[in-house]
Image (cartoon, rainbow, N blue to C red):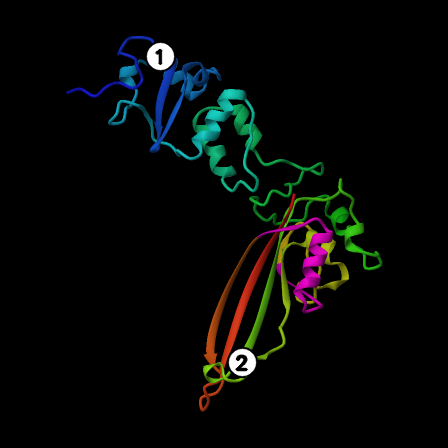
Amino acid sequence: MALADPTGCEDGAPFPDIIELNVGGQVYITRHPTLLSVPGSLLWEMFTQRSARSLARDSKGRFFLDRDGFLFRYILDFLRDRRLVLPEHFPERGRLRREAEFFALPELVKLLAPKLSEQNSLGDDPCQSDPEEPSPGGDTARGLVSPAAPTPAAQTGAEGRRAGFITIGYRGSYTLGRDSQTDAKFRRVARIMVCGKTSLAKEVFGDTLNESRDPDRPPERYTSRYYLKFTFLEQAFDKLADAGFHMVACNSTGTCAFAHEQTDDRIWTSYTEYVFYRE
């Protein structure tokens, strides 16, 4: 017995008003005029210039597109209202732009293109690669923090703040005796490490940022060689909160080793990273 055609169209007949699509395994139901909303696009060409017989179908008769089914929802949303609305911290911007190019949507491609700052340098999009040279506005960014300034949070207003990520790394260890019968002896934390764009790290931490291992770093470059001059995580969190950052992720790992061959004392070492983001 032949499969029912969910598209409701016969070969040679006009496409129906309601169309079912299978995009990479994801099923979408939309109206025919929505697919035609951008003249010249691939979907416009498929559903105006071709016949239903020439289009690929899945086992249930739905029109099939061998593309990313997750990202197609944003393609379809754009066709509906010609606007780009993405979730916060969207990590697939580059792939979505590739999908927009495939579907021949130049307006959407333009909206997804990397934005340029007023100094014609790459902006603070976290998906951008690290520029090899400092931007023409590097001197301005370098001047965001001055050792004589009262507080890092007061050096930039709400309009001057730039988006970006800062990662705080925290390493510590302690010794524990056999079967936990002795009190744990905590060792001094070696240091609190800072990873992120140089200009952001200097803005937040000011003169508490130790730059001895990475001096004269251009403001638009990223570094993981900075660390703080204090050893209390709360101090770092306070400074990040004052600068408008919020924690968005964290992860931790730990290892264990024997402190001495003749004893059962063990040394536990842990490393934790906290990721902060400012819009």
At label 1, which amino acid type do we have? Pro
Where residue 139 appears, as percent x and y from the top left, is 76, 48
The answer to which of 55 and 279 lies nearer the viewer is 279
Q: Residue at x 59, y 58 (%)?
A: 274
At label 2, which amino acid type do we have? Thr
What residue span does the magenta drawing correspond to?
224-248
Please say if 136 is above or below 167.
Answer: above
Give the quarter of the figure containing the C terminus: top right
Left or right position of 262 against 229: left
Where residue 136 appears, as percent x and y from the top left, is 71, 43
The answer to which of 115 and 75 lies nearer the viewer is 75
Please say if 37 is above or below 258.
Answer: above
The answer to which of 175 and 169 lies nearer the viewer is 175
Return the residue found at the far front. 181
- The Cα atoms of the two marked residues, 1 and 2, are separated by 72 Å
Q: Residue at x 52, y 24 (%)?
A: 106
Where residue 196 appears, as percent x and y from the top left, is 63, 54
Residue to which mark 2 is pinned:
175
Left or right position of 270 against 32: right
Residue to which mark 1 is pinned:
16
- 245 drawn magenta: yes
